[in-house]
Each structure stands twice: as structure tokens, then as C-alpha cells.
Image: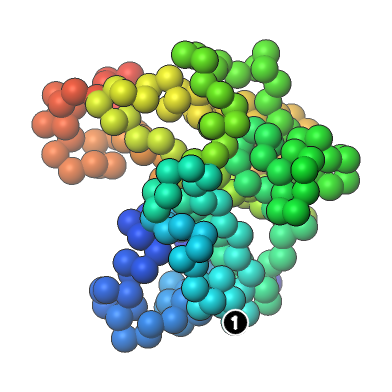
Amino acid sequence: MPPLRITTWNVNGIRNPFGYQPWRDKRTFDAMFDLLEADIVIMQELKIQRKDLRDDMVLVPGWDCFFSLPKHKKGYSGVAIYTRTSRCAPTRAEEGVLGVLCPPGSSTAYRDLSPDLHIGGYPTEQQIDMAGGVDPAALDAEGRCVVLEFPAFVLFGVYSPANSNGLRDDFRYAFFSALDTRIRNLTREGKRVVLCGDLNVSRSEIDTAQAEENMRKEGISHAEKD
């Protein structure tokens, strides 16, 4: 069997790719995914409300899809994972990092489901740093993470909070703390983890244009760069 190909893409609006070549000529998601030669496609920054999702976005021939959209701030952030049914099929799907949200049609949080129904690895209050009194429910309510479990690995599709001039540092650090802790918990359980997405972090100068100039601007620190 050929290797599984995973593609991650900040689309800056789920409709946006069709404004550019070669997607403009195709106009369908399945054709776009075929051009990417992908088996799993992770999209970030969808910028769409649930009520505005069209059939062609969620009923893609030959593909399953899993969305996380913000609960309160509409048309903002958002993550989707599309999986090619002929190549891979997730056994479980969840929304959010902490497991505090509920599956569709249920009043029981993911983390409170029986072990055979959830993915696991959920951080405890003692494990994560909720500096500034960040509400765990708010952390998972912005449409920033989809988690899928496959027989061979657990996949995180993530759109991390940006450092908006330091105004949401507590939220950003709490998100990273929760994400890091959950991944470590899962690996301790013997699961392989794949993390993909837009982390909004410049690990090295090649990760951003005009790196030195940006470093001088408020909101970007050497600690984050390093």
C-alpha cells in the first residue's frame, strides 16, 4: 500500500481556493483534493458559519468530513478534516482539545464517555496551566481543533490562536499547554500522534517573511521565535 499523504492548508476562507488557479477551473472539492493527491486534507481558518455550509462542502463524493466551527464568534477561525474513504477511515472523531464539548446529539462531554467511545488522553486541571482564569469551555469553543483516531495513529488538525499584540496571551498559552499535555498523555498510552495545522508560531526565520522586522513589532517575542 502506498504511503498515506496528508495535506494541511490555511485557506483563509473555505471558499477562497476557488478564486485561484488551478482550483478556479475545477470548482469542486473532490477535484481540488485529487489535484493535491491527498488522502487527508486539513483546512484551517474556514471563516464560515454552520448555517452557511453548502452541500458541496460537506457531501464530497468519496470523502468524509469533520468540522469544528466557533460556537460564539461567527465567521471566524474553523477547522475541517477531509478523509478519502478508499484510503482511510477514522474510528473516532472529536472536536476540541480538552474533551469538554459534547458530541452532536449528546449531552455528555467527550471526556465523560466510556473509554471505548472516546479517544482519551484528556488533560487534568493539575496538568495544564490555565493562566489568567481561562475557561476550559471557551478554549474548545473557538473552532480550533479536530481530533481523529485511526487504527494506526491519532491525528490533530489545529488552528492555534495568534499572538494579537499580546492581548490574548493567556488564552494562547493555555491552548498550547492543553494541546501539548494531551499529546503527551496519548503517547504515554502507547498511541502514535500526528499534529498538523497552522500553529501560528515561527520556529525559524524561514517560517515568516521579513522576520527581523516582524520581531521588532509588538506581539512577537524571542521566546516564541525560539
Question: Residue at (88%, 40%) from the top-left corner?
Answer: 114
The N terminus lies in quadrant: bottom right
The C terminus lies in quadrant: top left
**Near-viewer residue (205 or 164):** 164
**Residue 202 at what x, y percent from top left?**
31, 35
**Residue 103 at what x, y percent from top left?**
72, 49
Residue 112 vs residue 46: left or right? right
Residue position for label 1: 61
Question: Residue at (71%, 43%) from the top-left corner?
Answer: 102
What amino acid type is highlighted by mark number 1? Answer: Pro
User: Is any part of residue 6 visible from this angle?
Assistant: no
Question: Residue at (83%, 40%) from the top-left corner?
Answer: 113
Residue 60, above or below 151: below
Residue 34 vs residue 208: left or right? right
**Residue 40 at what x, y percent from top left?**
56, 64
Question: Residue at (67%, 13%) from the top-left corner?
Answer: 126
**Residue 104 at what x, y percent from top left?**
71, 53
User: Is any part of residue 221 visible from this angle?
Assistant: yes
**Badge 1: residue crowd in 10 Å (few <14, some 14–19, many ≥20):** few
